[in-house]
Image: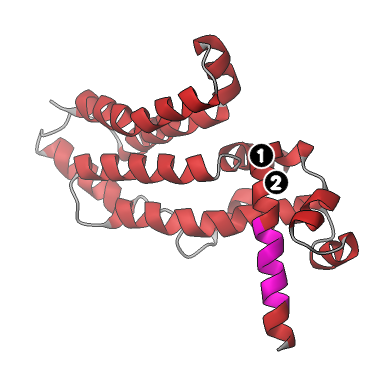
Amino acid sequence: MAKSRDNKTEEQILKAAQEIFQSKGMDGARMQEIADKASINKAMLHYYYRSKQLLFEAVFKKAFSLLAPQLNAILNDDSTIEEKIRSFTHNYITFIMKHPYLPNFIIQELNRKSQFIEEIKNNTFFPKLDKFKEQIEKEVKARTIRPISAEQLFINIISLNVFPFVGAPLIKAVANVDNESYKEILEARKKEVSEFIINAIKK
């Protein structure tokens, strides 16, 4: 019973922390606020997570463990390149709209400690490009798409999907749109990004 209660408490903490981090970011979040949201005292919160950084990492790793298998499955299934681009873009944008703190956190952690990527790379479902690379090479050889490496195509896909979240404040300011309007723009990008990339690689 004790183990069950512990698991439930930790789940409450992670859920509360995710909501606070999502609405206020890493810098704006406070441990006391997270404790209140989780309906526990601050001492209990520190028992589970000694610092805000450790709690943030736990929230990230939990979210990443949900996203990574989806993306890895898309890259390595038997769908066509066009289907992969559409599925990857749709799944990524849908997921990050629910967890908008993730892209900035990854960049922050990569700049803060170089070993961070090695820690998450050990995840069983960390996305792998092997099959995707084979597909691209086959399609290029068959001349069904223009010459491009899998690495360059993947960078294009990631860049066009990630930047609208990382650069959201700048884009919203330049475009002069509010949060609700920006959500509509992100929804539209699920199709826009896919079609843009697919048209770019077509012969």
Residue 191 shown left or right of residue 55 in the figure: left
Q: Residue at x 41, y 25 (%)?
A: 185
Q: Amino acid at mark 1?
A: Ser
Q: In which image quadrant can residue 149 be found?
A: top left
Quick one: 104 or 98, which is closer to the camera?
A: 98
Q: Amino acid at mark 2?
A: Ile
Question: Which residue lies at the image location 16% right of the left edge and 27% below the top edge?
Answer: 202
Q: Determine which of the numbered discs, if any, sits on residue 167 in the image.
A: none
Q: Which residue is mark 2?
A: 20
Q: What SS does tag 1 mark?
A: helix
Q: CA distance from mark 2 to mark 1?
A: 5 Å
* Residue 147 forms part of the magenta stretch: no
Numbered circle sitting on residue 23: 1
The front one of 96 and 85 is: 96
User: Which residues are the magenta region?
Assistant: 6-15
Visible residue check, residue 110: no
